[in-house]
Amino acid sequence: MTEKIARCGFKCHLCPAFVENIHSPVDQVKGASAWSLYFSVNIPAGMMKCHGCMSNKDDGFAFPDMNCPVRPCATEKGLENCALCRDYICAKLKSRMDGYESARKRFQGEIPQDEFEKYIAPYDAQKTLGEIRKASGDGHKLP
């Protein structure tokens, strides 16, 4: 599967809600249960089907977090992702990163590594965006 990175740095291609990772309703139930447990995010299992925030697909499943503060900000600034923003790491992005850090601290070592990789690791936005910034060079041209 091709790597797909959300504007906030989440790895869509690894996300349990990403449409290409949903093979049955059971996958949706597992993803919804994991989000509830690890992130205290309660989305009905039937809504666990996302094309990613980079998608323009409009089938009712384009993006499960309609309250995301990052997507409209990056879109307004014309940025592919927050790694390219002058305000990296702003309060909006930090709010997304905090969920990963909280879950990592609370659950790493208490759950099997494969479950950590499937349900928590895709949301390590700071690592992902940091790698993008590094690859583009610290002196990259910002809009």
Image (cartoon, rainbow, N blue to C red):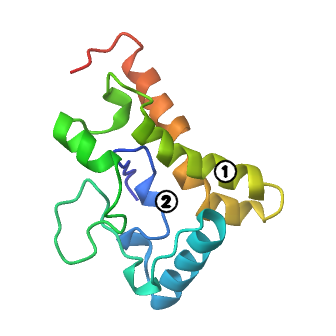
List x then y, in percent, for residue 70: 34, 46
Q: Quadrant of residue 46?
A: bottom left
Taking the spot 45% from the left edge, 34% from the top edge, the residue there is: 129
Between 112 and 35, the one lying in front of the other is 35
Q: Nearer the viewer, residue 87 or 138?
A: 87
The secondary structure type at the circle numbered 2 is helix
Residue 116 at what x, y percent from top left?
A: 68, 60
Q: Which residue corresponds to the image point at 38% horizontal and 80% vertical from the top-left?
A: 47
Of 64 and 129, nearer the camera is 64
Tag in front: 1 or 2 = 1
Q: Quadrant of residue 85?
A: top left
Residue type, numbered disc 1: Ser
Q: Which mark is residue 102?
A: 1
Of the pair 111 and 89, the residue shown nearer to us = 89
Residue 40 coordinates in the image, percent (x, y): 59, 67
Element under disc 1: helix
In the image, what residue occupies the spot 48% across and 82% down?
28
User: Which residue is the site of mark 2?
Assistant: 14
Look at label 2 and name its amino acid.
Answer: Leu
Q: Picture coordinates of residue 141 (x, y %)? A: 26, 14
Q: Inspect this view and state whether residue 78 appears.
A: no
Residue found at the very far top of the displayed protein: 139
